[in-house]
Image: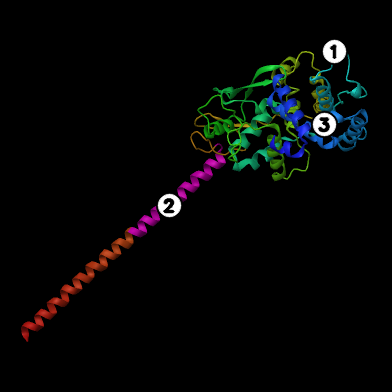
Amino acid sequence: MRSQKEKMSEKNYELFLQFNDNLIISSVSVNTRYKNLAHFGLLTEMIQKEWTEITKEDLQKIIMQIMLKHGDNGRDTGYSHALKTSLRAIVRFIETGSRNKPEDGEVEKIKFLKLKKPKSTLTREDLPTEEEVRQIINTCADSIRDKAMFAVHDEAATRAGELLGMRIKDVIVGEIGAKIKVDGKTGVRSILIVKSVPYLVKWINAHPFRDDLESPLWIYIDHEDTFGNQINYAGFRCILQKRVKQARIKKKITSHLFRHRTITELATDLTEAESRMRHGWEKSSTMPSTYTHLNQESVDEKILRRMGIKKADEKENSLRECAYCKTKYPKEMTFCEVCSRPLDIVNAMRMEKEQEEKMRAMIQEMLRQEHAKKSEEQERDELRLEIERLKLQINDKMRFD
């Protein structure tokens, strides 16, 4: 809020605060509210005048700027569409006090704006691969929170707002994985996770407010002025871009692509009803068909297998189990965090060899010290005997003299 005040005129900032109040009264989620306010700030920079003085011509110029900067060859992108939707909502709010379309018809100066949600041009090649996700998670070695946050986001295929809105009480760990509760577009739903559970449990155990079940699960921890506050979408996006850069991934990766990736992977394994339930889609949603077209590669493989050109590949198990306590871990983990034992035979043999070498070195050192001690004692005894012998010689000489 403070940074927006510095960028806006007094009148525009007053409208900004009123717009924020309207979003709160309308029960808009925290992350959606932050996104709308971010759009308000960006659009205010574009108009370079008071919102109350804006004309149809000004609005048309803004639309041109949006399309030139954020469109794709004259067509809307998801972001350009979102900005234009926000622009329309702001104009409605200024003119009528509501972000919704007036019952007696659209606001005159914005009637020219016809919005149509752009069709997805996303292909499977645009999605992050499993290896790229692993690289991103591996860059989080310095942050238990980040590692858990991205691991859960990827496995559960949550929307960013659903993930960030979680509280500690929304995690229930069971014998097989954990159930997380998220609140999204279609209401509250429960999602089973397995691979990311070790990371999540480790973060909860380290959470500064782990005893407060109402505390936000994902909080800021690096700066005193924001410590303990729930991470908002802008913050989450910042953290993600930092990790993508550290992983040296050139592909454009956004938070929603994590969701796209996992849903695409599961599309051939879950029925449409199961997909709707897990991913939070209403019965009327056409989203399942979106992910069907992304799985063209799977369709091609099935046809090739049917023709005998390609054999079915066995899916590699992405989890490994501790042989001692049966806890399941992602493949990249090498030691059990419950019993501290290695998770595979190679590490077990290496660890055993290291322990044997350490034991051998300890024994050798103990023998050396013992030998040194004996040598010192022997030297002292020999010296004592020599002194006694010399004393006797001196006494004998004195007696004869």
Give x and y (percent) for residue 118: 87, 26
Give x and y (percent) for residue 349: 52, 43
Q: Quadrant of residue 32?
A: top right
Residue 377 image label:
none
- Whether 117 is drawn above or below 151: the answer is above
Separation of marks 1 and 2 at Cα, in angstroms: 86 Å
Residue type marked 3: Tyr
Residue 79 image label:
3
- Whether 53 is drawn above or below 98: the answer is below
**Labels 1, 2: front one:** 1
Q: Quadrant of residue 270?
A: top right
Give x and y (percent) for residue 304: 83, 27
Packing grade of label 2 (10 A; few <14, some 14-19, many >=20) is: few
Residue type marked 2: Arg
In the picture, the quarter occupied by the C terminus is: bottom left
| Range shown magenta | 343-369
Residue type marked 1: Glu
Name the N-terminal-most of marks 3 and 2: 3
Is residue 349 on the magenta stretch?
A: yes
Is residue 292 visible in this depiction of the protein? Answer: no
Give the residue pinned by disc 1.
Answer: 103
Closer to the camera, 1 or 353? 1
**Labels 3, 2: front one:** 3
Give the residue pinned by disc 2.
Answer: 360
Is residue 346 on the magenta stretch?
A: yes
In the figure, is residue 343 to the left or right of 91? left
Q: Secondary structure at mark 3?
A: helix
Extreme residue in the bottom direction: 401
Name the N-terminal-most of marks 3 and 1: 3
